Image (tube, grey):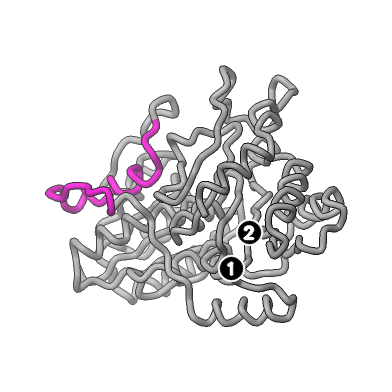
Amino acid sequence: MQGILIIAPNWIGDAVMTQPLLARLKAQYPSSKIDVLASTWVAPIYRACTEVNEVIEAKFEHKQLQWGLRKQLAKELQVKNYQACFVLPNSFKSALIPWLANIPFRIGYRGEFRYGLINLSFDNPSKVNRPPMVEHYLALSQLLKDDEVNTPSELTPKLNVSSLAKQSVEQKLALADINPKALLVFCPGAEYGPTKRWPTNHFAELTRNLVEQNADAQIVLLGGSSDHELAQNIVLQSGNNPHLHNWCGNTSLDEAIALIGIAKAVVSNDSGLMHIAAALKTPQVAIFGSSDPAHTPPLSEKAKVIWLNLPCSPCHKKICPLGHLRCLNDILPPQVLATLNTLQ
């Protein structure tokens, strides 16, 4: 198997959880070159995977077919003569490119009218009895070769910080007069919605408590541009604490990976940055609300999950259907601080 193409998922956390599949394929086919076709926003994850030969970036847009772009990509990929392609998203459009490129083995889960486009497949598990996402992706390797046995290390994603990104963030930290040895990272965002976001006033109180405990602490708020306003609320609610820095929207994902790799510890919601912290083995506290930590846990021995497991959880709703959001409101800053202190 000389050439393998991966069609990457569209979400950062999902992309992180595909790394064990890449490692498995590299172990199965050591001489193979594994390339990844990814959207621009998840491409940095694959640049942090040592198994990847080339990351092919494409400007995919959510809920858009982009037929012309997919035909052009298929034409460019066909000349690379891939023998197999793993189509990790479940959508119809994600299966079009390997089919148009005439890749012989097109592997994935059945879904959204993909019969014929995918020719080696498993049934999608039911939403009621879903396996952890890492195992979900890793299982696809069995469709080419089924004599492998999972080991615990294979189920743990691993990322590497690029030296270029590390150099860039070290310069940014120096310019902001932030001591890297005192750096903590808060990740207050979650693309899914409010039921995955720990309240901003709780993050603000945690900031005050941390600075009272350690006057040298420096806290960087990390996230995308859509999280900037959310983070600014935390800054205001903390009383414009000089130890708190809102960098949401001001770093690339490559730089965010490097910052998380440098940090003493991370406090995050169930988000893509949570999975990055786990894959970098950075000590972390992961706060869960409406989602299920059994399905998408941070896979690291240095991660501590806080989840109240209320009778109404996990509801997987974007907005609390009961209107109280107790699953997050009732996780109080002293509990998070106490958990954080057990990590350091």
Residue 136 sits inside the magenta stretch: yes
Measured from the top left, where is residue 275 in percent x and y?
49, 52
Check disc 2 and report the residue beneath it: 185
Residue 231 quadrant: bottom right
Can the viewer see residue 68 in this picture? no
Residue 34 sits inside the magenta stretch: no
Image-based side of 233 in relation to 83, left or right: right
Q: Tag 1's secondary structure?
A: helix
Check disc 1 and report the residue beneath it: 259
Image-based side of 5 in relation to 257, left or right: left
Measured from the top left, where is residue 88 in percent x and y?
40, 51
- Mark 1 and mark 2 lie on one chain; the one further toward the N terminus is 2
* Mark 2 crowdedness (10 Å alpha carbons): few <14, some 14-19, many ≥20: many
Tell me the quadrant of the picture where the N terminus can be found: bottom left
- Dot 2 amino acid type: Val
Q: How far apart are marks 1 and 2 (CA)?
A: 8 Å
Q: Is residue 62 above or below residue 215?
A: above
The residue shown at (67%, 69%) is 251
Measured from the top left, where is residue 273 in percent x and y?
56, 55
Report the span colored magenta.
130-153
Measured from the top left, where is residue 189 in percent x and y?
67, 49
Can the viewer see residue 78 in this picture? yes
CB-based contact (under 8 Å), mark 1 and mark 2: yes
- Dot 1 amino acid type: Leu
* Mark 1 crowdedness (10 Å alpha carbons): few <14, some 14-19, many ≥20: many
Q: Tag 2's secondary structure?
A: strand
The residue shown at (41%, 48%) is 299
Q: Is residue 220 above or below residue 52?
A: above
Q: Pick out the residue farthest to the top.
A: 311
The residue shown at (56%, 42%) is 339
The residue shown at (76%, 60%) is 244
